Amino acid sequence: PAQQQPASAATPPGGMPAWVAPLQKGMQLQQGGRWAEAAVAYKEACAHEMPLQQAVAARSNLGLAFQNTEQYERALAAYDDALKLAPTYADGHHNRGNALYKLGADRSEMLKLLEFLVPRLPADKPNHLLGIADPESAEAVAPLGIDTLDSCNPTRVARHGLLLCAGGAVKIKQKKYA
């Protein structure tokens, strides 16, 4: 694990620090769009002690490499490592948010995301989920700790004559309701 070190602390006598070559290789591979190979290089760099700024950059770039190979949970872990070292690192928060967004691409992924995220939210404040209000999702997110929801979905389905009722959906425009 990286720790804040003076630049000389990670430099062997008469040589280049062990983290420099893999970090540079990772950046070159990243520039060429070779994300999987870049991830390997960044992981190698992260295995060495290095100065704080480079440690944060290596972990953030590792997160980008994982994110660009659709390994979002691994990307989140790398961003979390970077943010532990530098909690105010804005790019780390931004990139972490993008990975969280990608992780929630469908209902099952949204639920995985909420299982991960809700325990990290303040327990003394309500948890509101914007944009989710279909009955299946509402029933699925409530046990995870979501307190309130809002969405345009109920209005949209009502506009088309569908009523959401406890006994199931009712198509109010059917002849039997005329």
Image: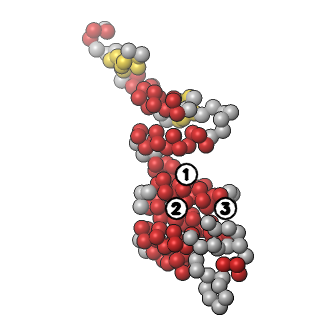
The three-letter amino acid code for the residue at tag 1 is Gly
Q: Quadrant of the C terminus?
A: top left
- First reached walking from the N terminus: tag 1 or tag 3: 3
Q: Which residue is mark 2?
A: 63
Residue at the left extreme? 175
Q: Residue at x 36, y 23 (%)?
A: 160
Task: Please state which of residues 100 and 164 is positioned toward the viewer in this rendering.
Answer: 100
Say which quarter of the image contains residue 8: bottom right
Residue assigned mark 1: 97
How far apart, in angstroms, are the residues tagged by discs 2 and 1? 12 Å
Residue 8, label in figure: none
Label 2 vs label 3, nearer the camera: 3
Which residue lies at the image location 55% right of the left edge and 51% below the top edge?
97
Report how far apart the C-alphas of labels 2 and 3 lie in the structure: 14 Å
Q: Quick one: SS at disc 2?
A: helix
**Regarding mark 1 in the picture, which secondary structure is present there?**
helix
Question: Image quadrant of residue 77?
Answer: bottom right
Query: Which x, y percent locates residue 112?
Result: 46, 42
Q: Nearer the viewer, mark 1 or mark 3?
A: 3
Asked whether, in this view, residue 94 is left or right of residue 33, the answer is: right
The mark nearer the N terminus, 2 or 1, is 2
Please state which amino acid type lies under the numbered disc 3: Leu
Q: Quadrant of residue 71?
A: bottom left
Observer-side mark, 2 or 1, equals: 2
Circles 1 and 3: CB atoms closer than 8 Å: no
Is the image coloured rainbow, by chain, by secondary structure, or in one colour?
Answer: secondary structure
